[in-house]
Amino acid sequence: MSEEIVIKYIETTSKCNYSCPICVKRTRNCHMDMEEFYKIVDRNIDLFHKKPIWLDLNGEPLVDPYFFDRVKYMHSKGLKTRISTNGALLNEENIEKIVDSGMNYIVVSVGTLNPTVYKQIRGVDNLSNVLNNLNNLKKYVDKTHAKTELQAVMIDTGANLDRNEFIKYFHNLGINVAFHNFTNRAHSIEMDINPKNRDLSTYERGECKGLKRNIIILSNCEVVTCCCDFLARNSLGNLRDYDYSVKKLVENGKLDQLISDLRNHIYKGACKDCSDWIYYQENATEEYVTVYPVDKF
């Protein structure tokens, strides 16, 4: 196996304080066991590389009762961390804890500045609270001179699009912005609010790039290699069966088989139902995420 294996995500929890129509329904709904977390970090330390590790996926990291202990442990091993949060739990206490923990990058998935659209995609009327929390987070980062970077994410819902307003609003606060295209997570989301109406037959599909460098460890210790496969339909196996070693797990051949299938246009599980592969091809003409850093605008 010539290409380097890299762990990109550890889903410390699959529980959430929201039940968003725009999100995949929860099937795991658990916190990762702390002892298993220690084993995963220790036994795979060489597979965490220079970029900060995402401590989330299909869950809200701040509902995890062990979250700050996990961050401290990873930092004690010289690892960098980042999270994506819905921002609802960024109260004063959590703001202080998350910044003081040394978290390197915090992404707040605001989604939109339109309260109506926010309620549509999140299922709750909580936009003003999230905006206030993010503003307070930025103030605390500035006050403590923390090196923590902040980013506000907007989701392309296809309706009442406020991209320029969104960018201006957060850049005025000194917060980076990212624009995410809507994804239905391999048709795992019932809400299809932004159909692109693409004719995918006009695109050439092959192997998705970087599968070996996109290892995702779920809260139940299942391993996947695609950010659209929230339901682990293309599971590579469970770390519990491989002494928590990702290297041992990938030796079972499932990852190589998945890559071979894609090269030969054989699509199974999540790959069979995926329409987001257009973002992950070697010569992709569309980007899933567009970043607008403050210092470049």
Image (cartoon, helix red, strand yellow):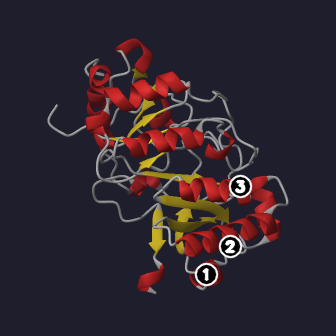
Left or right: residue 11 compared with residue 39: right
> What is the C-alpha distance between the residues marked 2 and 1?
8 Å
Look at the numbered disc 2 and give the secondary structure of its residue. Answer: helix
Residue 267: x %, y % from top left: 40, 33
Disc on the earlier residue, 1 or 3: 3
Compute the Cα span from label 1 to label 3.
21 Å
Question: In this image, 20 relative to 187: left or right?
Answer: right
Identify whether 76 is placed above or below 220. below
Along the viewing direction, whichever of 187 and 227 lies nearer the viewer: 227
Circle 3: element type: helix
Residue lying at 60% horizontally and 86% vertically, measured from the top left: 172
Residue 122 falls in image quadrant = bottom right
> Which residue corresponds to mark 2?
135
* Residue at (50, 44) in percent of width and height: 71
In the displayed structure, 90 sits above or below 134; it is above
Q: Is residue 234 visible?
A: no
- Say if residue 87 shows up in the picture: yes
Residue sticking out furthest to the left: 2
CA–CA distance between discs 3 and 2?
Answer: 15 Å
Quickly name the residue at label 3: 93
Tell me if label 1 and label 3 are in contact, CB under 8 Å. no
Which amino acid type corresponds to the residue marked 1 in the rendered image? Leu
Q: Residue at x 45, y 53 (%)?
A: 200
Classify the position of the N terminus by image quarter: top left
Residue 76, image x and y in percent?
Answer: 39, 42
Q: Are marks 2 and 1 in contact (CB under 8 Å)?
A: yes
Neighbor class of circle 3 (other Cα within 10 Å; few <14, some 14-19, many 20+) is few
Residue 25's place in the image compared with 117, above or below, is: above
| Mark 1 surroundings: few (<14), some (14-19) or many (≥20) residues within 10 A | few
What number is the disc on residue 173?
Answer: 1
